[in-house]
Image (cartoon, rainbow, N blue to C red):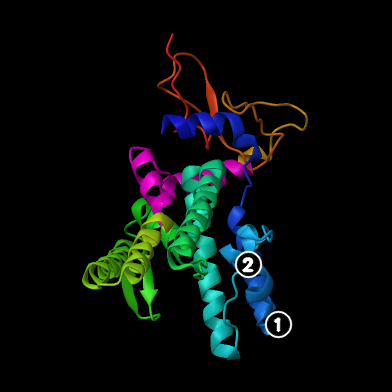
């Protein structure tokens, strides 16, 4: 927690705000790319470790432009719902953590998936496709931890709480890991045993960012829906401030309302003195004690 806070104080100004907007655009580009040229992604953009080692390093980034099915009206409909859910989940995480921490979470998820792909490559001697499945699951698990009682309408009829779906996802992932490990110990062939072990390990590595962030932020205060409503109200009040006059300044990042009209500021009651913080640092800063 302290390490992440130090990183945020040093590099927080470089965080990409509203990251899920750009990720969603990449999803849409991937879907359109699949319609135009289905083979292009696999030939030039996917995470092929063998080709990465031969100089095609752009694949370490471009694999996130993962194609999604858009065939037919039904495909477009479910794709639109999927994009909405991803955007909603990502935006909610950014509101709860702040832009920097959400950036770090998502990017670390990408790095974990790259590491998992390399583990599989050296274990099986070839490329195993790693898409966005575990990145999205890690994001969903984080959302379930922060907002466990939010309800989704399963099949547009059955109300299901987010935490219950997370339990199902976790059970499926756990079953897959146990299955691969069991197969590894049952097979008499060393090469096949290594493949199964690598598959199980790669799944755990791909979700490692969720485990790290869960333990690092488990005691962090979350922004409740009421607090988020107060933030929206504050935005309206901030626009009334005089142009060119700064009334608020964050003691951590130094930003004022002139840097971004959507910023909100609060004083910390636990700090000795009148120290004001933006909402991204209000719950994550180190309290000042004189």
| Pointer 1 local density, CA inside 10 Å: few below 14, some 14–19, many at least 20 | few
Asked whether residue 161 is in view, the answer is no
| Pointer 2 local density, CA inside 10 Å: few below 14, some 14–19, many at least 20 | many
How many discs mark residues in the rendered view?
Answer: 2
The extreme top residue here reads 290
The answer to if 288 sits in the magenta stretch is no
Could you say where residue 80 lies in the image, as x and y percent from the top left? 56, 76
- Secondary element at image label 2: loop
Could you say where residue 2 lies in the image, as x and y percent from the top left? 43, 29
Question: Where does the C terminus fall, quadrant-wise?
Answer: top left
Marking on residue 229: none
Which quadrant of the figure has residue 234? top right
The rendered magenta stretch, by its main secondary structure, is classed as helix
- Secondary element at image label 1: loop
Q: Is residue 199 left or right of residue 253?
A: left
Marking on residue 37: 1
Query: Of residues 111 and 262, which is closer to you in this image?
Result: 111
Question: Where does the N terminus fall, quadrant-wise?
Answer: top left
The extreme bottom residue here reads 72
Q: Is residue 257 above or below residue 230?
A: above
**Residue at image x 38%, y 74%?**
153
Query: Of residues 261 and 143, which is closer to you in this image?
Result: 143
Query: Of residues 41 and 50, which is closer to you in this image?
Result: 50
Q: Is residue 173 left or right of residue 275?
A: left
* Residue under label 2: 65
Q: Is residue 201 above or below residue 272?
A: below
Query: Of residues 246 and 120, which is closer to you in this image?
Result: 120
Which quadrant of the figure has residue 99? top right
Which contiguous range is marked in magenta?
Answer: 207-236
**Residue at image x 71%, y 35%?**
259
């Amino acid at each position: 927690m302290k390490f992440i806070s130090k990183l945020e104080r040093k590099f927080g100004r470089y965080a990409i705000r509203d990251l899920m907007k750009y990720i969603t655009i990449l999803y849409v580009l991937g879907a359109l790319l699949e319609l135009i040229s289905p083979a292009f992604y696999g030939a030039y953009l996917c995470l092929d470790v063998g080709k990465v080692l031969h100089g095609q390093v752009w694949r370490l980034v471009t694999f996130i432009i993962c194609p999604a099915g858009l065939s037919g009206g039904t495909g477009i409909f479910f794709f639109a719902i999927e994009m909405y859910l991803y955007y909603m989940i990502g935006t909610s995480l950014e509101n709860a953590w702040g832009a920097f921490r959400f950036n770090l979470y998502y990017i670390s998820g990408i790095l974990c998936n790259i590491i998992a792909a390399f583990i599989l490559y050296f274990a099986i001697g070839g490329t195993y496709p790693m898409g966005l499945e575990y990145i999205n699951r890690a994001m969903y698990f984080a959302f379930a931890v922060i907002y466990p009682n939010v309800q989704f309408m399963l099949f547009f009829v059955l109300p299901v709480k987010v935490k219950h779906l997370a339990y199902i996802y976790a059970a499926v992932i756990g079953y897959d890991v146990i299955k691969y490990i069991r197969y590894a110990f049952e097979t008499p062939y060393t090469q096949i045993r290594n493949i199964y072990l690598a598959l199980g390990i790669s799944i755990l590595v791909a979700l490692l960012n969720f485990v790290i962030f869960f333990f690092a932020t488990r005691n962090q205060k979350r922004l409740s829906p009421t607090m988020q409503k107060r933030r929206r109200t504050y935005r309206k009040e901030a626009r009334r401030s005089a142009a060119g006059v700064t009334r608020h300044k964050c003691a951590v990042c130094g930003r004022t309302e002139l840097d971004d009209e959507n910023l909100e500021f609060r004083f910390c009651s636990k700090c000795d003195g009148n120290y004001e913080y933006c909402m991204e640092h209000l719950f994550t800063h180190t309290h000042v004690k004189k």
